[in-house]
Amino acid sequence: MLDLVAHICGWIGTFLTLLAYVLVSFKKVDVLSRAYQWLNLIGALGLATYVLNQHAWPALLLEIVWGGIAIVALLKKVK
């Protein structure tokens, strides 16, 4: 059951990360917008759940950094 949850999180994370990229590429959202950063953060969390379950350590590091960047960008928006 945990594998299924991890796979679903991975697919959702993949979709949201790609959606963020598409929206920025076609200038539907700004790269500094909250929407873009939230899509990246939630996408990174979903993908991190999957890669942690798969013990894919290099990919986990990528998702931790990716999510961290989104958190920092969102915190800057608050200030």
Image: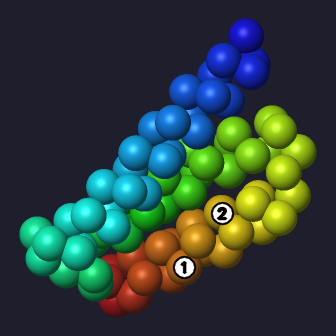
The image's colouring method is rainbow
Q: Which quadrant: the C terminus?
A: bottom left
Residue displayed at 23% across by 75% down? 25
Task: Label 1: state its secondary structure.
Answer: helix
Q: Tell us which disc is closer to us: 2 or 1.
A: 2
Front-lying residue, 35 or 78? 35
Q: Nearer the viewer, residue 11 or 64?
A: 11
- Residue 34 lies in what quarter of the image? bottom left
Looking at the image, can residue 29 be seen?
no
Kindly identify the amino acid type of the residue bearing the numbered disc 1. Ile
Q: Of the residues shown, which amino acid type is indicated by label 2?
A: Glu
Residue under pointer 2: 63
On residue 61, the disc is none
Q: In the image, residue 20 lies at what x, y percent?
A: 32, 63
Q: Position of residue 64 (x, y in %)?
A: 69, 66
Asked if residue 37 is positioned above or below residue 79 in the image, the reply reads above
- Marks 2 and 1 sit apart, C-alpha to C-alpha, by 10 Å
Residue wearing tag 1: 69
Q: Is residue 9 left or right of residue 62?
A: left
Left or right? Give the position of 6 relative to 18. right
Query: In the rendered structure, which disc, 2 or 1, sits on the residue that comes first in sequence?
Result: 2
Q: Label 2: few (<14), some or many (≥20) within 10 Å?
A: many
How busy is the neighbourhood of tag 1: few (under 14 within 10 Å), some, or many (20 plus)? Answer: some
Question: Is residue 74 visible to the viewer in this orientation of the structure?
Answer: yes
Residue furthest out toward the top:
1
| Mark 2 vs 1: CB contact within 8 A | no
Q: Secondary structure at mark 2?
A: helix
- Residue 24, by quadrant, is bottom left
